[in-house]
């Protein structure tokens, strides 16, 4: 279908293959060197779609042939291809930082990928993180392979009716028009996989998207060989019921790993972007069992260390849970025949309490139990996640729940405007996002005039664009735009608020006091204009009510002309807004915004943030770079909170932010505002980039995971076998252990502890005795390892000694025993712990 050769007359045109190669590599979504070629072929279509593959397929063969015989066109094409080819092949950050480390691959699983509007298989933030990290991995040379689903319809599209209510549309994604191609086997046959579902096997078709030097493989069930019901599995993203979701997750996780295997790829690392794809853990285990003739438990022990789970939600209710009956229906055969595992054991992996047969199967629990490393997506979210998963580690202090954090970042070249790109190139050079060279000081050299020129031009470009957009929107709503002129003023401070309309994001906080908002918008000396956008999930009625509330405000208020609600928030619209906006507002209720990424997209473009101290902003904010609302604490849904925070929001805008924007020096520029932009650009852009995030994942997660996997697997899983033995022994013998006498004495400003432990059947090297004290006033907890006293053991017990500073009273310290193995993750691989009191 998307095979270039299949297009009529294709092979007869010399150079067409080269054009197709360019059009099918999504590199064009962040590198605009080829734009002129597509524009040359069809300016109008290019403008409307920004999709080279559509241009290439639509334009007449004659026109393409003519273009290819034009010397300049041909030269440009050849230059681009050879430049790209060189850059994909050459050593990048990864090869330079870790020479000789032959990481086979990192398989990156995600339910959605936001790469370009031309491939609409995303909904929002989760896809954004996945897409931007894939692109950064390509820039940095990290061997990441994406695995996702190709949705026939994707996420819904949005329109408004006459009452300002959201309408839901599902245009079809014609795979022939998407910049992907069928994944073919060496003999040319389309790669199709089979998966057993109740009643029948189904066929899964495989597709390939190229993203610079990396690949994204997509699975889809819309194969004519399947029954109608099964053809629709990969139709909608986040549509359908729980059963549909389960089927999708089986296709993604099990199908995804099978796809890699069919290609002969053996990823050492598997990165689960959210728990949706956690079944990949099972299929990876199954493959290891098959290849090494091991049990399920040994295979999981070996492969676990190679799996990484990134959790994205800040509430327990955000995890996918399935009724055990549903899991039984879909996975009992798989468990029994392919994993040689009783279904109850499989279900236990997704339960808090393994023996509670009524408990639902939680995909996040499976992901956690099947991974060696787990992380949240901002520092605060790491903390929140440790709280959420605390119940899986009973009796462990919350700080020791084994969940770290890697704060998300955005792929800067995807979100910067052409003007910002030019300015940054002047200041920091072309390769600034492909390594780890600091750029702060270079950006600080930019003058007020340069920054103001960027801001003025970008605001104007945004307003031009949204005027066109708004006219189209009115037309699609059946209204005619009466004024052909621009709707907004190029010189007025422009505020953006665009995101998913979910109640926790409080998109109506700005509307808390409509009179006050009206005064802000229409202040004659210092007016504001506001651009809004966002969808609410079709099942989220409170979210939809918030959209209606805004549309009503716009319709009925005299300042309606200062506020624009643009329909169908998508990647293209997001790009337009973040590139031109002066101020980006974000008002989630802390701590519900796990990270948030839209605010990061304005940084490179010189937009500023006014946000709740939640997610990324809780760690990014300082007074020099923007503004904050909230007191940096959680209020547990206190109904009075909105009023308090709306007050801060209005107060800041009225007294600080808007005056600063309009405070002009003798050159007509707001120098204080520009100074803030300079600091925001310099300090935050690199820190909140996907490049930084991918480097962090690589150094602290991927490489240790790969090394750990090799260690556990080597020599016929020797270490894996030892770990399994240790784990079993701990499980069986732990309860035989107990504390004996505990003494302490204090002198020379130190406490000397002497603790007796009856080890039962455990060996001293299989455990560790520690003194533990809770964190005192903001400091970290104390963990002091105690040493076995030589010669003071008897056959039944062992004495342990430690001394600690007497700065805190001896009663603050509690002895405890935790399991120990040099290569095990504790408490991830055994949650046992014994406290002295
Ligand atoms: C960036 C982006 C998001 C995520 O933004 P949040 O800050 O997490 O709300 C969602 N949708 C689109 C289209 C985006 O571009």
Image (cartoon, rainbow, N blue to C red):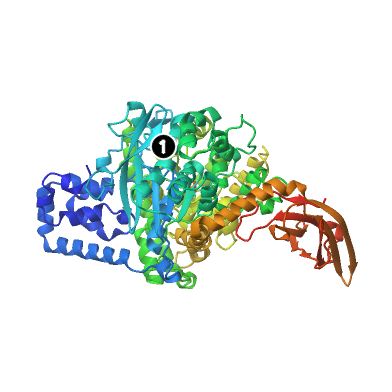
Task: Tell me residue 790's x, y (percent).
Answer: 80, 68
Instruction: Report which residue position mark 1 lands on.
Output: 237
Give left or right: position of 317 versus 35. Answer: right
Residue 416 visible at all = no
Left or right of residue 159, residue 326 in this image: right
Q: Identify the residue at image location x=27%, y=38%.
A: 174
Quarter containing the N terminus = top left
Q: Nearer the viewer, residue 474 or 385?
A: 385
Query: Cβ of disc 1 within 8 Å of ligand 1?
Result: no
**Does residue 67 sit above or below 559 in this rendering?**
below
Q: Image quadrant of residue 249?
A: top left
**Residue 135 rendering spot, x and y as whole percentages:** 39, 56
User: Can residue 48 be spotted in the picture?
Assistant: yes
Judged from this view, the residue extending furthest toward the front is: 795
Return the x and y of residue 315 as percentages of the image width and height: 59, 41
Q: Quadrant of residue 283?
A: top left
Q: How many discs appear?
A: 1
Q: Nearer the viewer, residue 95 or 616?
A: 95
């Amino acid at each position: 279908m998307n095979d270039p050769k299949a297009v009529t007359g294709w092979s007869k045109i010399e150079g067409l293959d080269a054009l197709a190669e360019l059009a099918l590599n999504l590199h064009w979504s962040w590198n605009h060197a080829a734009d002129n070629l597509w524009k040359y072929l069809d300016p109008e279509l290019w403008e409307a779609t920004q999709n080279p593959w559509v241009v290439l397929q639509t334009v007449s063969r004659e026109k393409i042939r003519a273009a290819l015989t034009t010397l300049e066109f041909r030269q440009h094409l050849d230059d681009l291809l050879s430049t790209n080819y060189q850059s994909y092949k050459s050593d990048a950050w990864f090869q330079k930082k870790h020479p000789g480390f032959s990481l086979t691959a990192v398989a990156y699983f995600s339910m959605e990928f936001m790469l370009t509007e031309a491939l609409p298989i995303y909904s929002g933030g989760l896809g954004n993180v996945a897409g931007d990290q894939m692109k950064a991995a390509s820039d940095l040379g990290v061997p990441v392979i994406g695995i996702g689903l190709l949705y026939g319809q994707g996420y819904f599209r949005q329109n408004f009716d006459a009452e300002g209510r959201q309408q839901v549309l599902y245009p079809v994604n014609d795979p022939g028009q998407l910049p992907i191609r069928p994944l073919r086997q060496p003999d040319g046959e389309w790669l199709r996989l089979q998966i057993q579902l109740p009643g029948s096997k189904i066929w899964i078709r495989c597709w390939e998207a190229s993203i610079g030097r990396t690949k994204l493989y997509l699975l889809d069930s819309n194969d004519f060989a399947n029954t109608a019901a099964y053809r629709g599995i990969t139709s909608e993203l986040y549509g359908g019921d729980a059963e549909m979701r389960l089927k999708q997750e089986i296709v993604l996780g099990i199908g995804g790993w099978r796809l890699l295997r069919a290609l002969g790829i053996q990823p050492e690392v598997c990165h689960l972007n959210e728990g949706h794809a956690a079944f990949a853990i099972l299929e990876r285990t199954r493959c290891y069992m098959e290849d090494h003739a091991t049990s399920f438990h040994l295979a999981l022990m070996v492969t676990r260390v190679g799996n990484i789970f990134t959790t994205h939600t800040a509430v327990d209710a955000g995890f996918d849970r399935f009724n055990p009956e549903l899991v039984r229906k879909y996975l009992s055969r798989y468990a029994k025949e392919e994993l040689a595992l009783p279904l109850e054991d499989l279900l236990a992996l997704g339960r808090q309490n393994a023996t509670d047969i009524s408990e639902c199967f939680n995909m996040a629990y499976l992901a956690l139990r099947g991974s060696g490393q787990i992380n949240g997506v901002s520092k605060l979210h790491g903390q929140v996640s440790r709280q959420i998963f605390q119940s899986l580690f009973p009796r462990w202090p919350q700080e020791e729940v084994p969940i770290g954090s890697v704060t998300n970042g955005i792929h800067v070249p995807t979100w910067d405007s052409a003007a910002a790109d030019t300015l940054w190139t002047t200041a920091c050079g072309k390769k600034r996002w492909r390594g780890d060279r600091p750029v702060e000081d270079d950006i600080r050299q930019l003058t007020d005039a340069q920054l103001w020129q960027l801001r003025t031009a970008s605001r104007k470009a945004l307003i031009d664009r949204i005027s066109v957009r708004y006219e189209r929107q009115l037309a699609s709503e059946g209204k005619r735009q009466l004024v052909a002129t621009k709707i907004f003023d190029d010189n007025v401070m422009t505020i953006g608020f665009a995101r998913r309309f979910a109640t926790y994001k409080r998109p109506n906080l700005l509307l808390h006091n409509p009179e006050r908002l009206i005064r802000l918008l229409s202040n004659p000396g210092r007016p504001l204009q506001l651009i809004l956008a966002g969808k609410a999930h079709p099942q989220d009625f409170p979210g939809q009510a918030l959209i209606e509330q805004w549309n009503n405000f716009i319709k009925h208020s005299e300042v309606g002309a200062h506020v624009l609600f643009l329909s169908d928030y998508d990647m293209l619209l997001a790009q337009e807004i973040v590139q031109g906006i002066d101020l980006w507002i974000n008002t989630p209720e802390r701590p519900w915004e796990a990270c948030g990424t839209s605010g990061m997209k304005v940084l490179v473009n010189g937009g500023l943030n006014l946000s709740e101290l939640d997610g990324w902003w809780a760690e990014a904010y300082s007074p020099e770079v923007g503004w904050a609302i909230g007191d940096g604490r959680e209020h547990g849904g206190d109904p009075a909170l909105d009023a308090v925070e709306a007050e801060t929001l209005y107060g800041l805008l009225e007294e600080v932010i808007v005056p600063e924007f309009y405070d002009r020096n003798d050159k007509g520029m707001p120098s204080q505002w520009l100074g803030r932009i300079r600091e925001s650009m310099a300090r935050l852009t690199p820190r909140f980039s996907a490049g930084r995030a991918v480097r962090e994942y690589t150094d602290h997660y991927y490489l240790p995971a790969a090394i750990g996997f090799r260690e556990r697997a080597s020599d016929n899983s020797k270490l894996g076998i030892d770990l399994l033995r240790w784990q079993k022994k701990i499980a069986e013998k732990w309860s035989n252990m107990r504390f004996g006498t505990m003494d302490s004495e204090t002198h020379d400003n130190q406490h000397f502890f002497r603790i007796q432990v009856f080890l039962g059947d455990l060996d001293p090297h299989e455990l560790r005795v520690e003194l533990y004290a809770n964190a005192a006033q903001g400091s970290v907890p104390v963990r002091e390892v105690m040493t076995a006293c030589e010669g003071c053991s008897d056959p039944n017990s062992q004495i342990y000694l430690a001394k600690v500073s007497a700065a805190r009273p001896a009663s603050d310290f509690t002895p405890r025993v935790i399991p120990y193995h040099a290569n095990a993750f504790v408490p991830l691989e055994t949650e046992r712990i014994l406290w002295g009191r």
